[in-house]
Amino acid sequence: MFLSPSLPANTPANSFGAFIFADRRNRLLLAIAVATAVIKMVIFKHFFPYLDFTSDTGSYMQTALQNLDHNIWPIGYSKFLWLFHQVSHSETALAVLQLTLLETSAYFFYFSIVYIFHPDSYFRYGFYAFLLINPLFPFLSNYFISDAVFLSLGLTWITLLLWMLHKPTTLILVLHGVVLGLAFTIRYNAMFYPFVALIPILLSRYKVWQKVAAILLPMVLIASFVLFIRQRSYEHAGVREFSVFSGWQMMNNSMYMLQYRKLDSTDVPPKFAVMHKLVYTYCDSLRRSERKKHVFEGSVFMWDNIGPQKSMLRNYWTINKDKDAYTAWAALAPLFRSYGEYMIKKYPADFFHYYLRENAMLYILPEPEVLNAYNRPYMGSDLKNVSAFFTDGKTEKPESKYNDLQSTLMALFPSLIVICHLLFLEETIRYLIRKGIRKSSRKFNIALLLCWTFILINFSFSVLAAPIVLRYQVLLIVLLLGYTLLLTEITDMPSSSYEEAELEKERVMLGI
């Protein structure tokens, strides 16, 4: 029971478990969090009873049902779905499980920060209130895509980095490596996570051999996964491709600039001749048209049925009628990647102007994309495995009556990202001006450096290589809001009051 004062006999008085369960206030906060999460999910499922689908759902579903080791998307989420399907065929159960993972990781982050840094009011109650009322988690959890699971792993990973600073044990080291490795199998955005992790690892109190192990473990797990996928791709498609989708994405990104200029067909390498002819014709028609493709439309070129990439795909299938979709995508991915890189190197200024600059603006104000509405009724004809995955899959799912409510709620969050960025920047400057570094502990200053490092590398990676939409930026919202509240609290606290409060809290933690 949450409000029970008793603890296991072997629980240390100053442990994290005792901090949550022996402290009446924290027990109450946890009890309210659990109760609110349950009530929130019940109310949410009343208004949105069915899982929502996207264009990615069918691929995840087929890979999970057949337990395949190859897919155009990372296979980690499909493996998660396969495990889930061994236990349940209920779509409601999947939504509940995904929300449970999200809420658990979010409150692990919350209570860890309260335990490690001892915030009094702004973070303790302000961030807690955000977690209670935040509508993003239920909506993300209600989608048959990888976002909820990836976000829960991302929050857990960030929290474990904070624990490395506070209590650098071998167990934390191993858990961090495993969680980071799992995150990479879900979404390849996690490829920059090891670079962010260098800061708390190198500045922690780990011994040298432990720091080396903490750095190498996730890298070994990631490298092993990359080699595994490349081998499976070779066995199935005859091409050693790790990320099939990235090759298609590279060419897609380059074409945003090509629609604005008259292409030069001289000196084009022979291997690009067929491809360039298709691109030339397609982009020339776009250049003459008033209707241009925009970066906020995401991977619009690769999905355009009259575009050069889909045309090449049809040409491939004309010659190789017996090949499946993955094999076709994998066979064309190296060509598309090379062509995209060739065009970017040829027109770097145009690429910066028409893609990177636009993507940078989109990073601050991302599109709600699929979160803007309930999409499942429009996906049904493309998803042949629904009835095999869910017991009620054959039942027709009507269009939601509450699309307006969903779009209204989701429309708030792009603006929230802008506000969070501005407030975080303003509070960081105020923190430095008012000598917050001297007021706060070394652990917090390293944690703040960690946050800034994540934001800057995430910005660079997203702008250079990834489509930017709201659901990819939820971790950013959580971090910006949480750290802004922490900065505000420390900055507003007089130096003497902060030092006295820290001493008192240390006495309490030590049982003095």
Image (tube, helix red, strand yellow):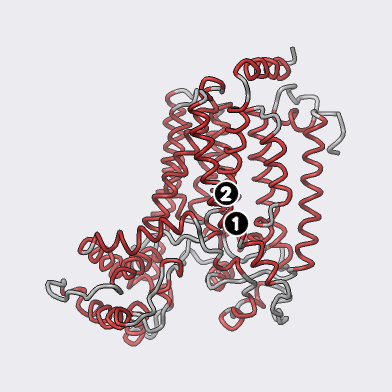
Which label belongs to residue 413?
1
Please give left or right for residue 246 compared with residue 200 in the image. Answer: left
Residue nearer the viewer, 86 or 258: 258
- Dot 2 surroundings within 10 Å: few (below 14), some, or many (20 or more)? some
* Residue 8 % position (x, y): 80, 28
Choose the circle earlier in sequence order: 1 or 2. 1
Look at the numbered disc 2 and give the secondary structure of its residue: helix
Callout 1–callout 2 Cβ contact below 8 Å: yes
- Left or right: 285 as drawn, with respect to 134: left
Residue at screen point 65% across, 34% down: 112
Position in image of residue 422 (x %, y %) = 52, 45
Q: Nearer the viewer, residue 288 or 197?
A: 288
Residue drawn 33% across the image and 63% down it: 240
Q: Amino acid at mark 2?
A: Ile
**Can residue 231 be seen in the rendering of this structure?**
no
Residue 53: x and y, percent? 61, 71
In the image, residue 355 sits, relative to residue 159, either above or below, namely below
Amino acid on which disc 1 is placed = Phe
The answer to whether residue 48 is left or right of residue 426 is right
Label 1 SS? helix
List the single residue furthest toward the left.
Answer: 267
